[in-house]
Every structure is written in C-alpha cells, then in structure tokens.
C-alpha cells in the first residue's frame, strides 16, 4: 500500500514538473514574439504603468510612454535607457496624453502612428481613484473619475481600433481592479468606472475576435503605487495619504511581471489578487447576502472613523 502511494506521489510530482517546464517553454516562446512590437502604455509616468514599461522594454518592444506629466515621462525614459542590455533595444517614445481630454485622443493616436507606423498592443492603464461616501461626493467628482477611467480608455481604444482592424492584428489590454468586480464602501465612483470597463471589455472582445484582435482585462488587488495618494476626495481634493492596504500590497515589479505573462498568454481575464479578495469575489457571485452583510459592517466602521 505504501509503495503504491509512493508511486502515485512520484508520478504526480513528475507530472507537475513537466507541466511547469512546458508552461515555461511556451511562455518563453511567447515572450520572444514580443520583440519589436509597438506597445502604447497610458499612465506610464509612475506605478503599474512604469512597471509595465520596464517589462515590455526588456522584452525588446518599442514602448510608447503616455501620461500628462512630461517630466516624469522623461525620468521613466531615462531609467529605461540606463538598463544594462546585451541586445539592441528601441529607444522609448514619449507622447504626452490627457485621458480627460477625450476629444483630443484621436489626434494623439495619429501622432503616435506618425512615429511608430503601427500599434500592436494598447495598454489602458491610466486612471484615478476615489475616497468618499456617495452622499458627500460631488457629482463633478463622479464625472471626472468616470471620464478618466472609463471614457478616456474607451475613446483611446476607439481611436486605435480601426488601425488594428485594418492590420487584422492587435491586442487591447485594460487594467481594471478587483473593485471592478466587487464594490466596497467609500469607493463608489472608482468601482463604478471599473465595473463599466469590465462590461465594455467583454463586449469588445466578442466583437473584434474575428479581426484577430485580443482583449485582456486584468483586475489587480492592492499594489504598492501612488494610487491612494493621488485619489480624489468627495470634494475633489487630492487625498494625499498612503493607505495601509496599498502600502502592504503587491510590489509593482511583481504585479507588472504577472501582467506581462497574462498578456503574452492571451488571457481574456485575470484576477491578480490574494485569497481574501478572491473570497470576496466568490461571495458576491455565489452567496451575495453574506457579501452584502460584510459590506454593511465595513461601511459602519468607516462612519465611526
């Protein structure tokens, strides 16, 4: 009996090792296919956007850095150029962009194409968070967050799509959030914008599949970025605080590497979060009454503060 268990155990271990080895080979092959691809990244001046720029640049891509803050984009570009490499890499391109100015985004895309001639991967990462109750949050704050997080990404995607359709190739990535899958008190505007992004991505994926265009939506949990620092309060002021949850989240380096894997593996949807967040998602979908009760308790704690 013990011998049989040992044989099964060894067989399982060998199968697991083979599976991981084969997956590693496929991932390595897919990464090689990234070389010379043109990758446009919004929100590239810091946080996840900056981390993604590093990952794609190291894979030999021509990275287009987009954000409002030109000075920070210059810093990111200089950091990339200073990375050691034994291979020739494409110098990153800087194209300032304001997602809040949706009418100008088609012009920005034309400018990018005049430099790069094509866009292979669009990563919609730029966004802004929110801290405030529904009753206290001014409507213009809701509108601003929805404009940047949702309409900005939608407008940019619509501007890029015709070129990808013409080429019959491309990939569109949306960096959403766990809060796009489950809402929590004090984040109504942010969660709503990310919920909308999830729905848009699902519709888009089905519509462009026959054009050989992939759509990936990634929902990370807390990541060590300046998201909470730059969040808008109920009155539209800058929050200016580092939340403990954010401070203790995944590192940008880890999250960016995992996101690159998801993109090259052509995943439709990925949740990049610890078990606690995954449990919350499970409860919301399968035991909603328990989830609602937990959120009521969480809201009461916020009110006490």
Image (cartoon, rainbow, N blue to C red):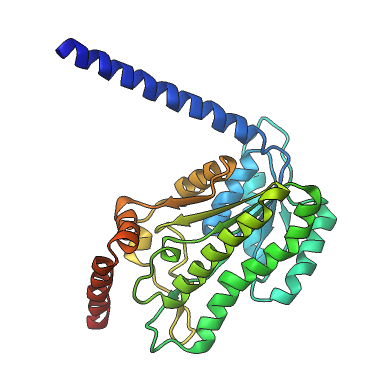
Instruction: Find residue 153 and report its image quarter.
Output: bottom right
- How many numbered badges does the structure rendering display? 0
Instruction: Find residue 19 and report its image quarter.
Output: top left
Horizontal and vertical percent position of residue 168: 76, 47
Residue shown at 37% from the left, 83% from the top: 133
Horizontal side of residue 212 vs 289, given as left or right: right
Horizontal and vertical percent position of residue 112: 78, 58
Above or below, comparing residue 249 to residue 235 in the picture = above
Can the viewer see residue 239 in this picture?
no
Residue shown at 35% from the left, 59% from the top: 281
Above or below, comparing residue 253 to residue 145 in the picture = above
Q: Between 226 and 222, which is closer to the camera in this rendering? A: 222
Horizontal side of residue 68 vs 198, given as left or right: right
Residue shown at 45% from the left, 46% from the top: 254
Instruction: Find residue 134 and report its image quarter.
Output: bottom left
Above or below, comparing residue 39 to residue 47 in the picture = above
Residue shown at 79% from the left, 51% from the top: 118
Q: Between 172 and 229, which is closer to the camera in this rendering? A: 172
Q: Quadrant of the C terminus?
A: bottom left
Q: Between 285 and 230, which is closer to the camera in this rendering? A: 285
Residue with the most extreme left position: 1
Can the viewer see residue 174 in this picture?
yes
Q: Quadrant of the N terminus?
A: top left
Horizontal and vertical percent position of residue 68: 65, 69
Q: Between 207 and 54, which is closer to the camera in this rendering? A: 207
Horizontal and vertical percent position of residue 248: 34, 56
């Amino acid at each position: 009996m013990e011998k049989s268990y040992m044989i099964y155990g060894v067989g399982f271990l060998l199968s697991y090792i083979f599976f991981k080895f084969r997956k590693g080979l496929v991932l390595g092959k897919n990464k090689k296919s990234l070389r010379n691809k043109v990758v446009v990244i919004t929100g590239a001046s810091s946080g996840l956007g900056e981390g993604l720029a590093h990952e794609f640049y190291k894979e030999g891509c021509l990275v287009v850095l987009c954000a409002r803050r030109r000075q920070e984009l210059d810093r990111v570009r200089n950091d990339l150029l200073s990375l050691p490499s034994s291979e020739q890499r494409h110098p990153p391109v800087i194209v300032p962009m304001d997602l809040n100015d949706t009418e100008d985004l088609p012009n920005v895309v034309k400018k990018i194409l005049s430099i790069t001639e094509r866009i292979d991967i669009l990563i919609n990462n730029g966004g802004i968070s929110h801290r405030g109750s529904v009753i206290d949050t001014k409507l213009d704050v809701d509108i601003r967050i929805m404009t940047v997080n949702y309409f900005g990404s939608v407008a940019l995607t619509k501007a890029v799509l015709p070129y990808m359709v013409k080429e019959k190739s491309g990939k569109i990535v949306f960096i959403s959030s766990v809060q796009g899958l489950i809402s929590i008190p004090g984040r109504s505007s942010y969660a709503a914008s990310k919920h909308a992004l999830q729905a848009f991505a699902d519709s888009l994926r089905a519509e462009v599949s026959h054009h050989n265009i992939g759509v990936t939506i990634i929902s990370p949990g807390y990541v060590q970025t300046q998201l909470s620092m730059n969040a808008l309060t109920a009155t539209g002021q800058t929050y200016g605080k580092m939340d403990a949850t954010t401070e203790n989240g995944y590192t940008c380096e880890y999250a960016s590497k995992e996101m690159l894997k998801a993109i090259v593996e052509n995943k439709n949807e990925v949740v990049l979060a610890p078990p606690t967040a995954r449990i919350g998602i499970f409860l919301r979908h399968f035991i909603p009454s328990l989830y609602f009760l937990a959120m009521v308790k969480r809201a009461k704690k916020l009110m006490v503060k």
